[in-house]
């Protein structure tokens, strides 16, 4: 076993992240061998004088990353293969660049946790029988052989026709492996290292990472209650000379906010005057629970130059990787050319099943159920935030989507508080995951769409008590002249 | 309608390619508007004084690229959307880089063509009923909800376990969207613009393109009857200082040749001494029709450092995009980290269906049928090459896979002859698609695995007559003191 790690209690890095980094380094360097047992959380917490949940949070990250594996009743082990009798110094010679941000812990460590961490649909709302029926219709239909044969880089033709049916006449369309690949393709086609891209701040980490990995600078445009701050754009465009602007007008991730109609018009005008590539991410657009639907940028854009990305992942099934980019024909042709050499084309079985699911009316029915459930969940999260969050907290009031953004009163730090929340059985994502150009230590994202109302209420009751208690502890520490304790 | 194009009859570029480029440019620039009718092949051939098949070959390329669309009985039209009232000079400002090589025409223009162009399994051998059964078992099983939910960037865990079951203990594994994405991921992880990568010459164009697009130099290593020329490696390594070597020891694409055991050992030794990232493409490895199976580089490599890529595309269904990379754990962790921000993870429905197809024994049964059919097809293509190709032709003698490489006697040019072959109802791919550092004008690839033996025999009879006739025409032209005519 390893020597015990030293923690830096004065660091910005929370202890669970320090522990995670320590064990990860030990595994990747080979000091902890595959198959080796690592101590149960309770035991290690005792050895290190930590809360058991702090250790569990570190293990959760390691497990998400595939570095350790838990076996029920047998503890956790270093995952992966037997030691390698390598001839290549992989880490030194080839793999020296740092890993990206650690993957977001998307799976709660146990069934008991109330997890607000993941912006994905609730499994218990999956219409499994309807999905089965669509699947059967596809595989028993006459197109099965065509689906199994090599396809087109543009996508499965019947699905493309279906998606283009309601679209403006000047649109063309490319099927992608979900919105994540759409972003990657757009990055590859339009940006070079050193280019600047304007993005909302805060923003979904997958978007930041796509550009960061390619050496492209992401410049954050602040997000307020009306979405991206349109008035900040001219100054940023003049200063940064960006090539592209990516924006989510409907139910932005992580804040959940929506741009009003006037802001959409203003943004289009500014983007067009600057000659920017304008990318509209409308992945949540079909999940409106309140208020009137607004036209998308793509619908408002008379030039047809807006590139819009959408997907079936949020509305239907994230495990089937089918999204798309709609935009001008010359751009779509280039994107398809690029996609051909990246992965030939998207999987055709899922394209055909989702087409059937949609054409048969099942998607519309399912959407209705998702909206009913979402409405109740949104209502529950707003009421619970109002009731339980400490005085001085602010939170957004989304009209749809899956996420809500909370700003705790100063000096509360959402990252510091997370392990304690997890110890109480509740999980969320601290704001720093989403930060671009500015960090808000008190911010956190609550993804509410995956939880039934009673769990939302219970989760926020627990979080609220923790936050209120911390505010009071800090206030009494301050009034006693003490520095705030580091947790 | 456009002014008629001017052809450069002295150019290396065949006429059908010149016509294709002319029409494509007209469409992409907007001079030919979407929805506009383009003349039927017969009419345009008359206007231009060309063979009708030359025009058909150009249209076929345009159609494959999605630029034109044919309607039975109504002629062909410029595909895509209505004209765009653009505010952005897409072509000038953003899309000025040239398109990659035009996509390989993978679809024969009509049912009558005998197409040797595509290295893919025959649709008529697809075990549709077995596929259906595997599909049903998956969607009716208890894992349906898990398949539909967001997955792991490493791949669907049960499939990973299945694929790793027979692998060396030090292997780890990442599921990819087929081998094409595996190549793209390896390029992104290991190479920078300006780096050199050693590849077989000739090679599958998808491999060339992955590196070329990233500004990575591909350096061709000649391929002989025993595969990549191992003796040429030390000199090329010293001169080019490559970072990576990609090699296909079994049934290489396009040549079909196989490396003997001694060459595999020698290559491993050289690659290890040079510290190269060694990538073994074994996509055809399961399709051996003759001779004894040889151990793969991965199996021979005691260090475990070889990265092996494989896929279900050739053995089973290319429309389901499931392949994988096996290799050392630290590399797989990095590749998964990369994949997460490229497209989150591969489609889970196809992963689960292929796992079921494999676990249930259906894949092994299907492989047996593929091998029986392949054996007969290989026998037919070898016999027909022997019988029909002109004296002085050389061709490889594959023991498996889908491809065979022909070198016609000088001065025959396979690119020039293609439109005439297509006019006679037979199609193949000229060698220039596969050239890296050297061009062989007389070379062509015959993909035989998709055709039944009688079609193979008939196709080669037609090709053989054309080639023999051309040899004789050239010989008599030469003996009459005339320069060879340009077709």
Image: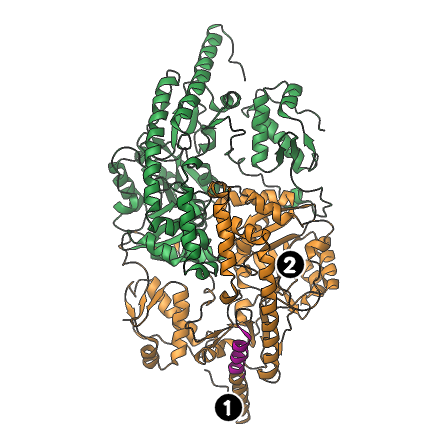
Chain colours: A green, B orange
> How far is mark 2 from mark 1, CA to CA?
44 Å
Image spot of residue A145 (x, y percent): 46, 61
| Same subunit: marks 2 and 1 | yes
Magenta-colored segment: predominant secondary structure: helix
Above or below A82: residue A52: above
Residue A366: x and y in percent read 35, 41
Which element is circle 2 on? helix
Label 1 element class: loop
Question: Does A163 appear above or below A226?
Answer: below
Number of numbered markers: 2
Residue under mark 1: which chain is it in? B
Q: Nearer the viewer, residue B122 or A465?
A: B122
> Which residue extends farthest bottom?
B480
Q: Quadrant of the N terminus of chain A?
A: top right
Residue furthest top as drawn:
A480
Graded by Cα atoms within 10 Å as few (under 14), some (14 to 19) or many (20 or more), the crowding at tag 1 reads: few
Q: Which residue is mark 2?
A: B240
- Determine whether, in the image, residue B264 is placed left or right of residue B112: right
Q: Which is nearer the eye, A426 or A3?
A: A426
Q: Which residues are magenta?
A: B451-464
Residue B261 visible, this angle: yes
Query: How many neighbours does mark 2 have within 10 angstroms: few (below 14), some (14-19), or many (20 or more)?
Result: some
Mark 2 or mark 1, earlier in chain: 2
Counting from the top left corner in percent of width and height, residue A156 is at 41, 57
> Left of B372 or right of it: where is B137?
left
The circle on residue A334 is: none
> Mark 2 falls within which chain?
B
Q: State which quadrant residue A67 falls in.
A: top right
The residue tagged 1 is: B482
Residue located 50% across and 87% down the image: B483
Determine the image quadrant of residue A364: top left
Instruction: Note whether residue B438 is visible.
Output: no
């Amino acid at each position: 076993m390893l020597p015990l790690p030293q923690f830096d209690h004065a660091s910005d890095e929370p202890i669970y992240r320090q522990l995670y980094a320590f064990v990860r380094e030990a595994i990747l360097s080979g000091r902890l061998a595959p198959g080796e047992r690592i101590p149960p959380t309770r035991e290690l917490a005792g050895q290190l004088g930590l809360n058991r949940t702090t250790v569990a949070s570190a293990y959760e990250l390691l497990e998400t990353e595939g570095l350790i594996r838990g076996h029920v009743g047998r503890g956790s082990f270093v995952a992966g293969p037997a030691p390698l009798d390598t001839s290549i110094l992989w880490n030194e010679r080839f793999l020296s660049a740092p890993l990206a941000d650690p993957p977001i812990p998307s799976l709660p460590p146990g069934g008991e946790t109330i997890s607000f961490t993941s912006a994905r649909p609730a499994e218990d709302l999956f219409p499994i029988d309807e999905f089965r029926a669509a699947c059967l219709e596809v595989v028993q239909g006459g197109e099965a052989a065509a689906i199994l044969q090599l396809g087109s880089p543009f996508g499965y033709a019947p699905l493309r026709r279906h998606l283009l049916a309601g679209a403006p006449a000047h649109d063309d369309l490319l099927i992608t492996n979900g919105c994540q690949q759409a972003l990657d393709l757009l990055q590859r086609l339009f940006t070079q290292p050193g280019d600047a891209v304007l993005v909302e701040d805060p923003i979904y980490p997958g978007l930041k990472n796509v550009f960061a990995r390619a050496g492209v600078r992401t410049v954050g445009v602040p997000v307020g209650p009306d979405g991206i701050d349109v008035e900040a754009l001219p100054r940023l465009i003049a200063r940064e000379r960006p090539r592209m602007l990516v924006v989510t007008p409907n139910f932005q991730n992580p804040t959940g906010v929506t741009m009003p109609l006037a802001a959409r018009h203003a943004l289009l005008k500014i983007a067009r005057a600057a000659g920017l590539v304008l990318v509209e991410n409308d992945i949540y657009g079909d999940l409106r629970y309140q208020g009137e639907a607004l036209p998308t940028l793509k619908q408002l854009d008379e030039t047809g130059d807006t590139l819009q990305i959408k997907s079936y992942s949020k509305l239907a099934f994230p495990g089937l990787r089918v999204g798309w980019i709609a935009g001008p024909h010359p751009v779509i042709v280039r994107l398809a050319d690029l996609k051909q050499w990246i992965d030939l084309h998207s999987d055709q079985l899922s394209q055909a099943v989702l087409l059937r699911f949609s054409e048969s009316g099942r998607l519309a029915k399912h959407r209705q159920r998702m909206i009913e459930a979402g409405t109740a969940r949104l209502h529950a999260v707003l009421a619970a935030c109002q009731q339980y969050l400490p005085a001085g907290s602010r939170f957004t009031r989304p009209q749809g989507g899956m996420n809500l953004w909370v700003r705790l009163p100063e000096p509360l730090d959402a990252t510091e508080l997370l392990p304690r929340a997890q110890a109480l059985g509740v999980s969320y994502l601290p704001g720093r995951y989403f930060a671009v150009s500015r960090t808000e230590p008190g911010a956190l994202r609550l993804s509410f769409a995956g939880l039934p109302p009673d769990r939302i209420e219970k989760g926020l009751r627990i979080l609220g008590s923790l936050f209120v208690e911390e505010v009071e502890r800090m206030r009494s520490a301050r009034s006693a002249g003490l520095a705030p304790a580091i947790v």
